[in-house]
C-alpha cells in the first residue's frame, strides 16, 4: 500500500519516563527522536543556498510536521536536546545522550530504538562515541542532511524518514549505532564524512555500507555483526571525558603545538601522522620529552582516510612513548582515547584496545 496517506493517530500518550508521543498507535514501534541541530534543522532565505545558511535554526517538531508519513512508521517521542552546529557538540552533551539512551530506550522494554538528528561535520565523532557507550542491541540511528531544510530538494526529510524506518526495523538490531543518509546505512564504527558538500558523503570506504533503502524499505546485505576491533565503554562510571587534543602532522611541523597542548590541560594526545603515522624527527623527540615529563598517552594516527598505523612502525624507543592507532583515524582515536582515560585505563590497557584495530 502506498505510504503517502496520513492515517496517523491523533491520540497522544506519555510514557512512564515522561516521553510524549503526539500520534500514538499501539500497533506501531516506539522510537525516541533526539534532536541536536545541524543542517537538517538549517534554514536560509535563498532556496538555492547549500552554503552560508543558518545551521540549527528549526525545531524538531517543525521538521516533523513536513513529513506526516513518518507517523505511519513509528510512534515518535521527539526531544530537543540542543540545536547547534555540530562543531558545538561536546562530550558532556554526548554523556547526557548516553544516559538518556540507556535509561529511556535500552532499559524500557516498550521502546524499539532511537534516532538522533545531528550536524554532519562531527556526526561521525558522536556516532562513534555512542556506538562505544550504548550497547543494548536496540538500533540507535544517526541522521543529518547536507542541504538545509529550505533548499530545493532538501535531503533532510527523506533522511529522517529513512532513519526512523531503520530504527524501527527488527533487522537493524545488534549492529551497533548506524548512520543513515543518502539512502545508505553505514556502521557508526567505520563511517566518515568524505565530502564537505555533496549528499553522498558518509562512507566506510574499505568496509562498505551495511545496506540501503528503496521506497522506504531497508535492506541489509548481511546478518547482524559487530566490528572485530570494537571496545565498549560503561559510561555510568564517569561524568566527564578528559581533554584529548589532535595535532596534525605536516612538513615543517612545530613541536610547540605539543608542549602547549599539554601545558593547557590535554590529558592525551592524538597525532594525525603522515602516511602510516609519520612525524618529523624533532616532533618524535618532543613526544619522548613530553611523555617522560607528564606520562600522558600519545596515539599516532594517520591523516590518510584509509589504512592503519602499524605497531611495527613504532617499535624501538618510540614504542615506549607512542601508541599506534591501527585503523582508527584521528577523530576516532580522540574519542576512544578520551573514553579510555575516563575509564581510568592505564597505558598498557590503552595500548591493548588500540591493538585490536591493528593488523601488523
Ligand atoms: N551538513 C551539516 O550538518 C553541516 C553543519 N555545519 C553541521 O555540522 O552542523
Image (cartoon, helix red, strand yellow):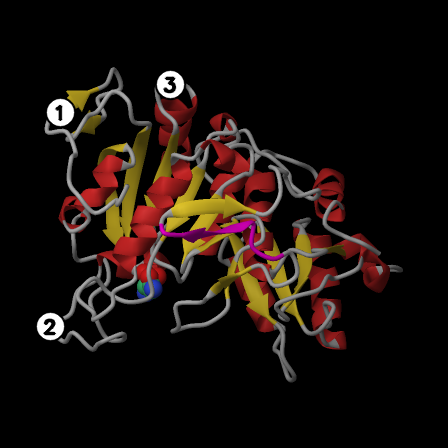
Give the quarter of the image for residue 269: bottom right
Badge 1 marks a residue whose secondary structure is loop
Q: Which mark is residue 99?
A: none
Q: Residue at x 74, y 45 (%)?
A: 356
Q: Which mark is residue 45?
A: 2
Q: Are marks 1 and 3 in contact (CB under 8 Å)?
A: no
Q: Are marks 1 and 2 in contact (CB under 8 Å)?
A: no
**Comes first in the chain, label 1 or label 3:** 1
Q: Which residue is mark 3?
A: 108
* Residue 69 painted magenta: no
Q: Position of residue 62 (x, y in %)?
A: 13, 49
Taking the image in four quarters, ligand 1 sits in the one at: bottom left
| 255 or 338, nearer to the observer | 338
Badge 3 marks a residue whose secondary structure is loop
User: Against 35, is 332 above or below?
Assistant: below
Residue range highlighted in magenta: 208-215
Q: Which residue is mark 1?
A: 12
Badge 2 marks a residue whose secondary structure is loop
Q: Position of residue 188 (x, y in %)?
A: 52, 48
**Comes first in the chain, label 2 or label 3:** 2
Question: Between tags 1 and 2, which lies in front?
Answer: 1
Number of numbered discs: 3
Amino acid at each position: 500500500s502506498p505510504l503517502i496517506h496520513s492515517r496517523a493517530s491523533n491520540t497522544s500518550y506519555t510514557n512512564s519516563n515522561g516521553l510524549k508521543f503526539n500520534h500514538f498507535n499501539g500497533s506501531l514501534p516506539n522510537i525516541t527522536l533526539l534532536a541536536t541541530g545541524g543542517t537538517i534543522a538549517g534554514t536560509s532565505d535563498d532556496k538555492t543556498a547549500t552554503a552560508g545558511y543558518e545551521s540549527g535554526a528549526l525545531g524538531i517538531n517543525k521538521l516533523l510536521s513536513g513529513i506526516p508519513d513518518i507517523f505511519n512508521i513509528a510512534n515518535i517521542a521527539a526531544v530537543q536536546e540542543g540545536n547547534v552546529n555540530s562543531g558545538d557538540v561536546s562530550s558532556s552533551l554526548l554523556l547526557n545522550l548516553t544516559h538518556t539512551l540507556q535509561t529511556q530506550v535500552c532499559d524500557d522494554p516498550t521502546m524499539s530504538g532511537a534516532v538522533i538528528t545531528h550536524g554532519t561535520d562531527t556526526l561521525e565523532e558522536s556516532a562513534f562515541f555512542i556506538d562505544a557507550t550504548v550497547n543494548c542491541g536496540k538500533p540507535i540511528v544517526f541522521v543529518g542532511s547536507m542541504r538545509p531544510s529550505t533548499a530545493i530538494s532538501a535531503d533532510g526529510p527523506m533522511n529522517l524518514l529513512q532513519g526512523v524506518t531503520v530504527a524501527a526495523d527488527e533487522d537493524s538490531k545488534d549492529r551497533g549505532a548506524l548512520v543513515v543518509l543518502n539512502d545508505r546505512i553505514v556502521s557508526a564504527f567505520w563511517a566518515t564524512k568524505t565530502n564537505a558538500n555533496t549528499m553522498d558523503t558518509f562512507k566506510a570506504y574499505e568496509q562498505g555500507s551495511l545496506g540501503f533503502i528503496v521506497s522506504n524499505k531497508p535492506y541489509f546485505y548481511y546478518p547482524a555483526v559487530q566490528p572485530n576491533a570494537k571496545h565498549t565503554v560503561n559510561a555510568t562510571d564517569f561524568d566527564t571525558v578528559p581533554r584529548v587534543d589532535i595535532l596534525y602532522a605536516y612538513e615543517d611541523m612545530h613541536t610547540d603545538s605539543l608542549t602547549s597542548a599539554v601545558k593547557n590541560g590535554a590529558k592525551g594526545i592524538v597525532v594525525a601522522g603522515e602516511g602510516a603515522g609519520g612525524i618529523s624527527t624533532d616532533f618524535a623527540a618532543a613526544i619522548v620529552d613530553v611523555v617522560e615529563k607528564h606520562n600522558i598517552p600519545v596515539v599516532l594516527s594517520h591523516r590518510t582516510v584509509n589504512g592503519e598505523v602499524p605497531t611495527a612502525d613504532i617499535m624501538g624507543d618510540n614504542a615506549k612513548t607512542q601508541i599506534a592507532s591501527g585503523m582508527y583515524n584521528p577523530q576516532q582515536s580522540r574519542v576512544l582515547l578520551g573514553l579510555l582515560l575516563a575509564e581510568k585505563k592505564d597505558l598498557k590497557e590503552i595500548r591493548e584496545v588500540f591493538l585490536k584495530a591493528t593488523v601488523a
